[in-house]
Amino acid sequence: MRIGLINVDSKLPNLALLKLAAWHKQQGHEVEIYTPIEAAIDPFDMVYASKVFANTPDCPYLPEDAILGGTGYNYSVLPDEIEHICPDYSLYDMQYSLGFSSRGCIRKCPFCIVPAKEGGIKEHSSLSEFVRHKEVRLLDNNFLASPLWRDKLHEMIDRKLKVDFNQWLDIRLITDENAELLTRLNPPYLRFAWDFVELEGQVRKGLETLKKAGFPIGKRRVNMYLLTNYNTTPQQDLYRIETLKAMNVLPYVMVYEKHKAHRLMRELQNWANQPHILFKYTWSEYRAARKLPAIGGDVI
Ligand code: SF4
């Protein structure tokens, strides 16, 4: 049996396809990842297509009977025996492991699909289920909300894993204990988010706790995602960026509904998301160099 896998809107390794590949190979099937380039009769007995984003273009040449999955199409989940198989990392010749140790989240941020798609926090997989390399990209939505975070951090430290908490950690859940464990784990960088302006106190407290534990905050090894164009003013966006810059934390501006955003928001993103530019120029200098207009008088 020949199985075709289509990664519709990304060139990055797709976890569901990696698991489907592993499972079908286990059944003795041939598996191939491919991109259909015309509406031809394809040579596969079964085709799966995965799409991550709802607002990206679909593949125009999908076979009619292709099995569709991923948030871009629907909220379907893989059967347990496929979901809990170790991904076939050879599909993309990957030198790192990828997976979720927990799913869901304890929070209900209104701009986020996780609460509707996955519900509350729940354990998903042990690390041994999917970790096959020293380098690991962990996709947990809110790793520190998992009741097992302590055991998992100890296991990562014991196994000397190089972990990228790819979907960000929750700065509100930083404690003396997990800050100390994260410092011992010593990932290349930590990612957090400061989406709501009113979280400033908790953001500062979390960063301070990490610093006290010895994590090198001042060495630009912390990224802070900032949601903009959602419920903040441009002044509040600028304030968050400059506050982080002063602490040597790297802001990363995300523009909500970018297609509807004022051009200046995208410029703010261009300035803030490139550390070599951010740390060289103030916003005023950058704006003057780019001859950018002010919004509504001289808003920013
Ligand atoms: S904390 Fe993160 S994952 Fe959880 S609801 Fe908010 S944005 Fe989504």
Image (cartoon, rainbow, N blue to C red):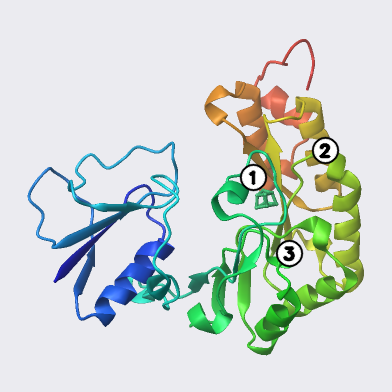
Quarter of the figure with residue 155: bottom right
Question: Is 187 on the left-hand or right-hand side of 131?
Answer: right
Could you say where residue 275 lies in the image, as x and y percent from the top left? Answer: 68, 48
Q: Is residue 34 above or below residue 215?
A: above
Q: Mark 2 = which residue?
A: 197
Q: Mark 1 = which residue?
A: 274
Residue furthest out toward the bottom: 158
Q: Mark 3 = which residue?
A: 145
Observer able to see residue 92: no
The residue closer to the viewer here, 137 or 5, is 5
Name the quadrant of the C terminus.
top right
The residue closer to the viewer here, 13 or 23, is 23
Quarter of the figure with residue 294: top right
Q: Is residue 287 above or below residue 274?
A: above
- For the residues labelled 2 and 3, the Cα–Cα distance comes to 21 Å
Residue at point 69% right, 64% down? 189
Q: Is residue 197 above or below residue 78?
A: above
